[in-house]
Amino acid sequence: MSEHHLLSEEEAEQVLSQLKVERDKLPKIKLDDPAIQYLASIHGDIKEGSVVKIIRKSETAGEFIVYRLVIRG
């Protein structure tokens, strides 16, 4: 199971700076993805260009974090 968290613009900028990556180089997730739809039900409208933090559980790594850029789908 994965946890999805919508980052604030400030948090997104910090992550991008830390990772030394441009926003458009992040892997993508579509606005119509069920996880994004669920986040939208909690946070309200999610805009294209938002960054989502995904925490995944793994038997070998324990847990690891990935980031996705929200795009129109």
Image: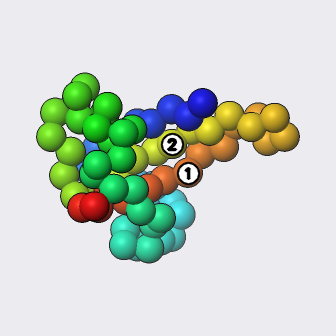
Callout 1 secondary element: strand
Which quarter shows the C terminus? bottom left
In the image, residue 70 sits, relative to residue 61, either above or below, namely below
- Of the residues under marks 1 and 2, which one precedes in the sequence? 2
Name the residue tied to disc 2: 54
Residue in view at x 62 percent, y 38 percent: 56
From this viewpoint, which residue is outermost toward the left?
45
Rendering quarter of residue 64: top right
Number of dots carrying numbers: 2
Give the numbered dot on residue 21.
Answer: none
Quarter containing the N terminus = top right
Q: Which residue is mark 1?
A: 66
Relative to 17, residue 56 above or below: above
Q: Is residue 54 left or right of residue 51?
A: right
| CB contact under 8 Å: marks 1 and 2 | yes
Q: Residue 24, percent across and down?
A: 36, 72
Q: Amino acid at mark 1?
A: Val
19 or 73, which is in the foreground? 73
What amino acid does circle 2 point to?
Ile
The residue sitting at 39% across, 56% down in the picture is 29
Above or below, 53 relative to 18 = above
Q: Residue 57, position in %: x, y?
A: 68, 34
Question: Could you say where residue 13 lies in the image, as x and y percent from the top left?
Answer: 35, 57
**Residue 7 visible to an observer of this rendering:** no
The x and y percentages for residue 47 are 19, 52
Residue 15 lies left or right of residue 55; in this view the side is left
Q: Foreground residue, 30 or 50?
A: 30
* Image point (56%, 34%), residue name: 2
* Residue 22 sits above or below residue 62 on the image: below
Q: CA distance from mark 1 to mark 2?
A: 5 Å
- At x 16%, y 33%, the residue is 44
